Image (tube, helix red, strand yellow):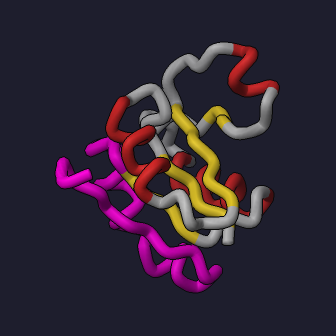
Amino acid sequence: MNSLITSANSAQAHRLKNKLNAVDNIILGDYNELPAFMLAQGKMIKLPNPQSISYTHEMLALCLDNSIDIIYVLDNKEVMLLMESKQLFTEYNIDIQVTGDEV
């Protein structure tokens, strides 16, 4: 199973990654700037900006390209947009999980 955790620059994302340690492959992603050396290792990816009018479709394409099965969404902007399109992601067997401060 491939999982994507958004807001890679946050401590919350790293806590969640450690909590989900049993999951086969966890990828951290962020639409904010990430250091080039982190992107080069392949464990972090650049996500589309939620301000983009095609954000949902860009995220869907990214998930399909990376065989993502589940997205853990930490950013409020991303939560709103992805939850509006949850049915679309469900049709492609991609689960969207909204994660609060309990992590």
In front here: 43 or 61?
A: 43
Task: State yes or no: residue 59 in magenta.
Answer: no
Q: Residue at x 52, y 55 (%)?
A: 56
Residue at 45% x, 80% y: name it.
87
Quarter of image, res 50: top left
- Locate residue 94 relative to residue 86 in the image: left or right: right
Residue located 40% across and 50% down the image: 16
What residue occupies the far left of the structure in this picture?
101
Residue 102: x and y in percent read 18, 54
Span colored in magenta: 74-103
Q: Is residue 89 magenta?
A: yes
Q: Is residue 92 left or right of residue 33?
A: right
46 vs 96: above or below? above
What is the number of callouts on the image? 0
Residue 4 locus on image (x, y percent): 57, 54
Q: Which quadrant would residue 92 be assigned to in this image?
A: bottom right
Quadrant of residue 34 within the rendered picture: top right
Q: Relative to 75, is 63 above or below?
A: below
- Quadrant (top left/top right/bottom left/bottom right) for the N terminus: bottom right
Residue drawn 55% across and 17% down? Answer: 33
Choose between 9 and 85: the one closer to the eye: 9
Q: In x, y percent, where is residue 68?
A: 66, 64
